[in-house]
Amino acid sequence: MINFQYARATDVADAVRQIAADPSAKFIAGGTNLIDLMKEDVERPTRLIDITRLPLKTVKETADRGLRIGALVPNSDLAYHPLIAQRYPLLASAILAGASAQLRNMASTGGNLLQRTRCYYFYDIATPCNKREPGSGCSAIAGLNGMHAILGTSEACIATHPSDMCVALAALDAKVHVTGPAGARTIAFSDFHRLPGNTPQRDTNLQPNDIVTAVELPARGFAANYTYLKIRDRLSYAFALVSVAAALELEAGKIKEARLALGGVAHKPWRDPSAEAALSGQSANQATFNRAADLLLRDAKGFEHNAFKIDLARRAILRALTQAAAGTPQSQSNKKIQ
Amino acid sequence: MTRTPQPIGHSIPAPDKLPVSMIVNGVEAQLKVAPWTTLLDALRDHLDLTGTKKGCDHGQCGACTVLVDGRRINSCLTLAVMQDGAEVTTVEGLAANGALHALQQAFIDHDAFQCGYCTPGQICSAAGLIAEGRAKSADEIRELMSGNICRCGAYPNIVAAIQQAMGQS
């Protein structure tokens, strides 16, 4: 870890002023990813601006019956918040599928969105990585790529976004509230994270001096028919090989509306409107689910060690849609997959 | 988001040490630490509380688990300066009035360790788990203790010890 200065922000405007004044400064909140990356010399800020004392720690109902989640609400508090548990159990389940109890106690809502990939080569400063050192090359494409992306990859980067929470937020059509030097604005969740393209060093569409202030959920939570199904190398405390957030609204045995997002397979949570449209208006059966899986995975491309993910994702999608339709969501403590 | 990366090996001059005040195991502690001092290093190197262990130093093993304001966290992934004003409880602070904490006694009763290196983190994590009140079944204990790795593999006895302590609290 390199030496750095430490400062505290007193309010959101002060945080934006401080970050704009120092191009090599970074915000710190939970620290669970940033401090780890600093210990590895992947992140090398010369100033940390501590935002943990900003008043962004509440969950409030919005005028249109949604929820506004402050960017500093810890992941554990969010997962166990009564309004989340009742109205957005998909989000609660996804959060509890990720990390450990200690990390969830520390990690913030905004920081979860901004965590970096866990690609081994991104973490290892002795190897080329276009995300860490643009133009240096990608070590994963011809390397150990069992954990890497099968959708939306580029010749520059095949890293995945590691979050579970973000997969649920994508499925729920959340919005991200951001403040920058020009003021506040909102970003649709689907526009927040980026595909790698030629600029894999950019994970999100935030501008350099922006701060995430809140995540907003719309009113619809799909609390009756949902599941978050996460498949990983060990049963707990591991990143997803494939995860599926599925949410259905059923009416008279048919699917009125569907949401389907994948984690662990791309540089951002993966949704495809055509897959969701293929579910809408149809009976909730295996033929319908198969069509949706075909569409969601139609552009999937495997590499030497991760081609298994394509079949794994297909099976996970079918299982998740079956769980959601039956109203039997995946338990995150008893790991048996029904 | 892209910000100006600093070259590897680049270092700014050492900043002044910063004052930090914490209540550690019920006792007020006044420290002056460099900004990059983690809470774990402050506890071990500045306060000589070496019960809290440095395992991986990357938040993957749980050996450094302590309670901050009653919540279990990985002390290796937070800076001491960020915890100014906090109440910290380490494994040294669990016993009271000369008697072991129920978890400490339960770990002995169930032989819930072999080498013992992960044990302070296991016990602090279990204290946090019991305070949270979310775990009822053995499955839930296992899941919510998954952030504490035991390379000796004492897991069945750790779960049994926690169940014993839960019954007493």
Image (cartoon, grey):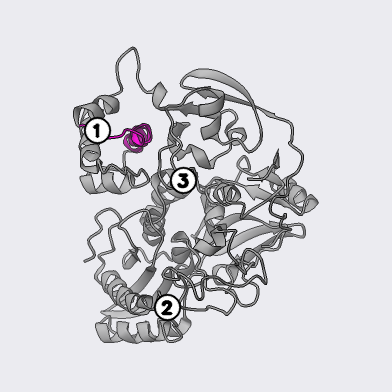
Highlighted magenta segment, given as a residue range: B111-132
Instruction: List the residue tagged with mark 2.
Output: A304
Q: How far apart are marks 1 and 3 (CA)?
A: 26 Å
Within-10-Å neighbours for mark 1: few <14, some 14–19, many 20+? many
Q: Check residue B166 in the rendering and tell me which mark sits there, or answer none.
A: 1
Q: How far apart are marks 3 and 2 (CA)?
A: 30 Å
Expressed as whole percent of the image width and height from the top left, the position of residue A190 reads: 55, 72
Expressed as whole percent of the image width and height from the top left, the position of residue A19 reads: 74, 51
Q: What residue type is labelled 3?
A: Gly
Instruction: List the residue tagged with mark 3.
Output: B59
Q: Is mark 1 on a helix, strand or loop?
A: helix
In front here: A205 or A307?
A: A307
User: Do the numbered discs 1 and 2 sit on residues whose CB atoms are within 8 Å?
Assistant: no
Q: Is mark 3 on a helix, strand or loop?
A: loop
Expressed as whole percent of the image width and height from the top left, the position of residue B22 reads: 56, 25
**Residue under mark 2: which chain is it in?**
A
Q: Is residue B113 shown above or below B7?
A: above
Q: Which residue is drawn at 35% across and 73% down?
A: A249
Q: Residue B155: name its quadrant.
A: top left
